[in-house]
Image (tube, grey):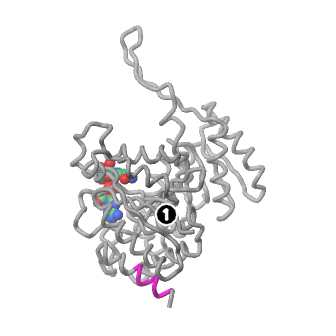
Amino acid sequence: MSKRILVLPGDGIGPEIVNEAVKVLDVLAGEFGLDIEMDEGLIGGAGYDGAGHPYPEATREMAREADAILLGAVGGPKYDSLDRPLRPERGLLGIRSDLGLFANLRPAMLYPQLAQASSLKPELVAGLDILIVRELTGGIYFGQPRGQNVLENGERQGFNTMVYTESEIERIGRVAFEAAMKRSKRVCSVDKANVLEVSELWREVMERVAKDYPQVELSHMYVDNAAMQLVRAPKQFDVMVTENMFGDILSDAAAMLTGSIGMLPSASLNEKGAGMYEPIHGSAPDIAGQGIANPIATILSVAMMLRHSLDRVDLAERIEQAVGKVLDDGLRTGDIMSEGCTRVGTEGMGDAIVAALRAQAS
Ligand code: NAD
């Protein structure tokens, strides 16, 4: 049976980069037997412009029916003065919580051809391949109580609550262990168990989950040390699993190790295996409409979709090989440009990846 894919281009460079990723999906459907049907919907500022809401009802209905969603990016200065509930980012939060996308997978992988682009020395990052599994719908970003109040002495106080249930920890733990089973079978769970009770529980539950995966080696690390180790010796990590806020911070640090934000995909999954796939970068209003954005993060998001929601690891690998081939050939968008390489635009990069895929078929 065909799988339904909902395509949500969004704002800024979103439509430009998604267009290239759709070309890749078209080739996989036309020439590699991928059985899909694609719908397109509005989200973010485009949702507000077209339907008066950043997560319009029509999009909500299609999202609930979809096996996988491909999203470009949302946001832009044009929408900054809207009331908060109508801002583009609310569309993103809306779809994440509506679909229960609790597991955020962010690989930080460095293509050897781009080792010079990293902020670390090439020998520290060459071959880097980390997967950060971040819990996305719990923890301090959602915990109650939260707010601000005024103390008896008149001073104001702000507070948030970091809270996790055992089942929330267990389900993100299982995602991490399952992912590790397909990689080099190591999970590092990151917490702050020396200070936080919620982290003590986190650690206990991770230990319990680990018993079901005897082939996987589990280690624990405090978040402050993990931040240090990521910039000292990042290649020691395979899969890192952590709670929402720690994951937010660590995954951005890990992303920078790989040089360009235009290269990194992400997946957000729910319990049924449906997922939303998107580049980690935003809508880049500064370069929107110029045809120069790097579409590789979005194209690699399609590879993640094939791996995690469409059960076609073979095709995911083909995309990754095609991207490698194009980089080997020296093609670069502006964000990853270096001496001796050939500069191409968004379309040029997409077309080259499509051609590399086609060459695999012949
Ligand atoms: P950004 O990621 O959009 O851009 C940061 C810098 O990276 C810019 O200089 C941009 O030109 C560059 N860049 C980003 N993607 C690129 C690509 N594919 N190719 C080449 N260069 C690229 O972050 P920002 O400027 O802080 O935010 C811009 C807008 O995007 C804001 O409205 C923000 O709220 C939104 N945003 C959306 C998401 C999302 O949709 N998931 C994530 C982050 C930010």
Picture coordinates of residue 100, whole percent (x, y): 53, 46
Tell me if residue 163 is in the magenta stretch. no
Picture coordinates of residue 333, whole percent (x, y): 32, 72
Disc 1 residue type (three-letter):
Arg
- Location of residue 82 (image quadrant): top left
Q: Residue furthest bottom?
A: 362
Tell me if residue 357 is in the magenta stretch. yes
Q: Main secondary structure of the magenta part?
A: helix
Lateral position of residue 171 relative to residue 107, left or right: right
Picture coordinates of residue 344, whole percent (x, y): 30, 77
Q: Residue at x 36, y 75 (%)?
A: 350
Which range of residues does the magenta coloring cover?
353-360
Q: Residue at x 47, y 36 (%)?
A: 141
Task: Look at mark 1 in the image and give the residue it sits on.
Answer: 4
Decide which of 125, 334 is in the foreground and name it: 334
Can residue 122 be seen in the rendering of this structure?
no
Reply above or below: 346 against 30: above
How many numbered markers are drawn? 1
